[in-house]
Image: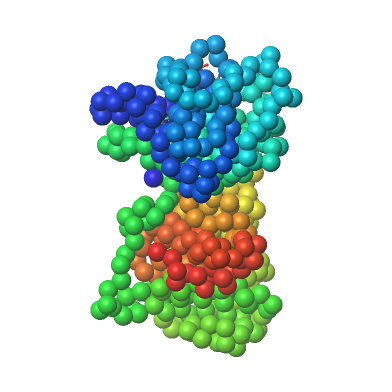
Amino acid sequence: MKILTPSQLHKADQYTIEHQKISSWELMERASLAAVEKIKAILKAPKPVTVLAGSGNNGGDGLAIAFHLDQLGYEVEVLVLKYTTEYSKDCKINFDRLQAKTEIKVEEFTEDSNIESLNFKPVIIDAVFGIGLNRALPEFVEKVIKKANHAQALRIAIDVPSGLFLSKLTPPQSIVFEADYTLTFQCPKLNFFLPDYGNALGKIQVIDIGLDKSFINKLDSDFEFVNKKYIDGFYKVRHRFSHKGDYGHLLVAGGQYGIMGSVSLTAKAALKSGVGKVTVLSPQCGVEILQHSVPEAMVIPSDDIEQVSPKHLNFKPSNICIGMGLGQSKLAVKSLTYFIRLSKQPILIDADGLNILSKNKNLFEDLPDQSILTPHQGELKRLIGEWGDQYDKLDKMKKFSRQYNIILVSKDAYTFTVYDDQVYINSTGNSGLATAGSGDALAGIISSFLCQNYSPLESSILGVYIHGKAADFYTTSNSELSLTASDVINCLGKTL
Ligand SMILES: NC(=O)C1=CN([C@@H]2O[C@H](COP(=O)(O)OP(=O)(O)OC[C@H]3O[C@@H](n4cnc5c(N)ncnc54)[C@H](OP(=O)(O)O)[C@@H]3O)[C@@H](O)[C@H]2O)[C@H](O)CC1
Ligand SMILES: [K+]
């Protein structure tokens, strides 16, 4: 799903209104009715609602939502935060409809109103500002939002949590509506996925409001929101008449004394993601451990008891995955160098392998094109250097990817897969993935898809998606904090 900017969305609005021969108010009504359906599903049964409405079109949505909830028997009150003298055209239509057709108490709140007297119902719907916010919130609006954030209420934002900027980063210390749910129209927006105010979004639900698809397809965007529809576009169905040779042979190189779990998780995750065969190059101390923990994997002992070492292989791996538990000793550097030079296919480098790369940038010259690096944020900093703000980080990641022709999987609350100028933002996963071994499993999953003839970019996008989806499956019946990397691996079979 393409991630569009506010100006692109406004253009798509206009094009749709002209080509579907509908009025802007009808488009607003369409969006609002769809939002009401989502609100009904979230609330499960009518609950008293306070709608905070602005005087623009986001406010117009709010007044339409108030009207339709009232028609459904909800107890609704409306607070209009009059931050402009005039209502937008469509907002005014909905304001008049409320007055004419309902008994709803509509209170206009301005900078002279008394904030102390303000109370909220158990559900607060934020329709104050949407994609049109373009300067700091008026102080009285800030006060209302701050009070709403402290209320004992379920908070639902319409389109954008008010106070969140979309065309620039929201300044620190800003007041932003802290939503439990954000019902956003047509597509998510880039700033939803940045750590600055990412927690203010709550659960994001995208509502397709039928903007003209042919027009949207022609729009340029560097950002793609990866959902199941996107994955279905390239996911391969397996055929009955196939054999394990069709699904590749992965070499996993890593582990050291006391950290054998890393490669064990990687090998297991690769096997549970469909690779045909896995061989682990393991320190001698880990051979028995691996033969017990991952009987499906073959094991080659390195020449060292406690560490991996360069080793002549008696087979040609389809792809190599290296770095987890590798350590950063001289022998580890030699091993990484050896396998980078040995590999003629894209190689996946994770964990200590990345830290060695950061200190030995000359190794990039030998790195096969479209190799995959899977840093967490600390490893990313060591690779691409310190960044200023989140937009600067995005630029640095794109530049790094272009400079070395590599795919960068930046693991975070929302994992960003970066290749050249394109950024793929993953839609699955949850906070439970912030746990030991989660990255080892991801490395195995991505490498497994590499061996199954997905392109390196597809392998990265698909691997990140599946990894998160497995975690989401686990947390449908378990808490996020109880998630372990082994749970992710055990739930891989439930994905797709
Ligand atoms: N295709 C869609 O996504 C649809 C979205 N809809 C809804 O429309 C809003 C966008 O409506 P818009 O009127 O463009 O913008 P807002 O409602 O967010 O803001 C209203 C105006 O307020 C002014 N503004 C901006 N910042 C401030 C501020 N800090 N203080 C005071 N006023 C401010 C600004 O106007 P200016 O002329 O003053 O610049 C805004 O335009 C979208 O989010 C959806 O909710 C449609 O309902 C359906 C299609
Ligand atoms: K809003």
- Percent x, y for residue 256? 65, 76
- Residue at 46 percent across and 74 percent down: it is 272
Residue 19 in view: yes
Q: Nearer the viewer, residue 295 or 145?
A: 145
- Percent x, y for residue 363? 54, 59
Quarter of the picture holding the N terminus: top left
Residue 390 in view: no
**Which residue is farthest top?**
85
Colour treatment of the image: rainbow
Q: Is residue 300 above or below residue 168?
A: below
Q: Is residue 69 left or right of residue 13?
A: right
Q: Nearer the viewer, residue 191 or 15?
A: 15
Q: Nearer the viewer, residue 275 or 190?
A: 190
Q: Quadrant of residue 124?
A: top right
- Percent x, y for residue 45? 52, 47
- Residue at 55 percent across and 35 percent down: it is 75
Quarter of the picture holding the C terminus: bottom left
Q: Is residue 121 above or below residue 415?
A: above
Q: Is residue 44 above or below residue 161?
A: below
Q: Quadrant of residue 263?
A: bottom right
- Residue at 58 percent across and 38 percent down: it is 48
Q: Is residue 56 left or right of residue 141?
A: left
- Residue at 30 percent across and 71 percent down: it is 238
**Which residue is farthest right?**
116
- Percent x, y for residue 34? 40, 39
Q: Nearer the viewer, residue 468 or 446?
A: 468
Q: How many marks?
A: 0
